[in-house]
Image (tube, rainbow, N blue to C red):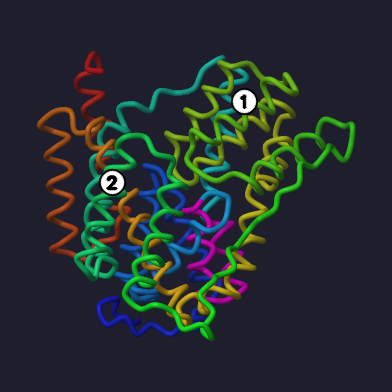
Amino acid sequence: MADGRDGRARPGRGSGREVAWLFLRLGLVAFGGPAAHTAMMRHELVHRRGWVSDERFVDLMGATNLIPGPNSTELAIHLGFERARWRGLVAAGVCFILPAALIVTALAWVYVHYGNTPAVAGILYGIVPAVIAIIVHALVGLARVTIRSVWLAGLALAAVAAYAVGVNELLVLASGALLAVLVRAVRHPPRPSSPMAVAPLVVGPSLWSDLTSGQLGQLFVTMLKIGAVLYGSGYVLLAFLRGDFVERLGWITEQQLLDAVSIGQVTPGPVFTTATFIGYLVAGPVGAFLATVAIFLPSFLFVGLLTRITDRLRSSPWTSVALDGLNTTALALMAGVTGQLGRAALVDPLTVAIAVATLILLWRTRLNSAWYVAAGALIGLARTLLAPGVS
């Protein structure tokens, strides 16, 4: 097995089975949102297994920001393709999504039958600090690869500042790529014969009308539309779901929507499994299945198309420098999200101790990241049982 430190892993030389097992396990422990998912994938695939180099990982991470949909899930799909081509693409995506979809379906059943969901705050109390440490460890490693000049460091700081004052994430990413191209144009003006213009990857979404008057058909098409056009964070997903399922269709209430989003955020794996919860509320287990397939299906299709152009992005000086800018700002956004998570999660000496201990172990050992998440969960559960009155 290749060592992640030498970066010489050969793409497409693995099996679909090993990809499936790895991403199934990641799907079970990937708490904390897209930044945490990205950090865990980097730890497992680059640091521990050497399936891809840090340079290639950063390029794939940046490329997935060009397309709509859940970025961490699309990164998983792309990494699966890198390891085992089309079998890996399907195996990575399905196995990363499956655990969260099953967990959310079970919680939706509890919600429908008992009116609420089991409390998970105690477990998350210990998990989130460990996840923050995993993200910080990944950020440091990725920054060494991505930020290779003083001006890129300045770009990263500007992107963090823009995120902190509330600038839209997509605008930050686009600005990073554009600024990188402009800087290169100033330093190395293009000759008239050398094409500078880069055709952007444009997804022209059509506002599909419902293909059927049946509820299941409407559910599937609506979720498919959202998965095909949605850029941005979970807050953007909330706006889409509210507009369609609360206001236009009237199938769920505002409170049910908020409960669905909460379940998507506190369970492992993609936040987009919020759709699974809503599908269950609308049409039971069949609705949960159709909603899950519909909202994630565009990601598989987009990544399948993206695999054909990712290598070309590095072949041209102009697209390569745009990708550098995109990667730098994507890394800065990860740092901004981590800062917000840290302020919310590191609330007392115990949570700080969990984060620091995890960070030290990450640098000194090559343990599976699942152990850190499991240890944090056990600490949080023990605290809840021993001091049930602590919130």
Residue 162 placement (x, y as % from top left):
32, 42
Instruction: Bin the neighbour count of mark 2 within 10 Å (Cα to Cα): few under 14, some 14-19, many 20 and up.
Output: many
Give the position of the C terminus as an image quadrant: top left
> Which amino acid is tagged 1?
Arg
Q: Residues within 10 Å of mark 1 (few under 14, many from 20)?
A: some
Secondary structure state at the residue bearing disc 2 = helix
* Residue 177 shown in magenta: no
Residue annotated with mark 2 = 160
User: Residue 173 vs residue 207: left or right?
Assistant: left
Figure quadrant of residue 198: bottom right
Label 1 to label 2: alpha-carbon separation: 29 Å
Residue position marked by numbered label 1 in the rendering: 242
Number of numbered discs: 2
| Kind of residue indicated by mark 2 | Val
- If the image is split into quadrants, where does the N terminus sit? bottom left
**Image spot of residue 332 (x, y percent):** 30, 52
Give the secondary structure at mark 1: helix
Q: Position of residue 51 (x, y in %)?
A: 39, 75
* Discs 1, 2 touching: Cβ within 8 Å: no
Q: Residue at x 33, y 60 (%)?
A: 328
Where does the image place residue 363, in percent across and percent down from the top left? Answer: 15, 62
Q: Nearer the viewer, residue 210 or 289?
A: 210
Pick the front one: 179 or 283: 179
The extreme front residue here reads: 192
Magenta stretch prevailing secondary structure: helix
Q: Is residue 279 above or below residue 194?
A: above
Q: Magenta segment, which residues?
A: 71-95
Q: Relative to 26, is 241 on the left or the right?
A: right
Residue drawn at (71%, 43%) of the image: 225
In the image, is residue 76 part of the stretch drawn in magenta? Answer: yes
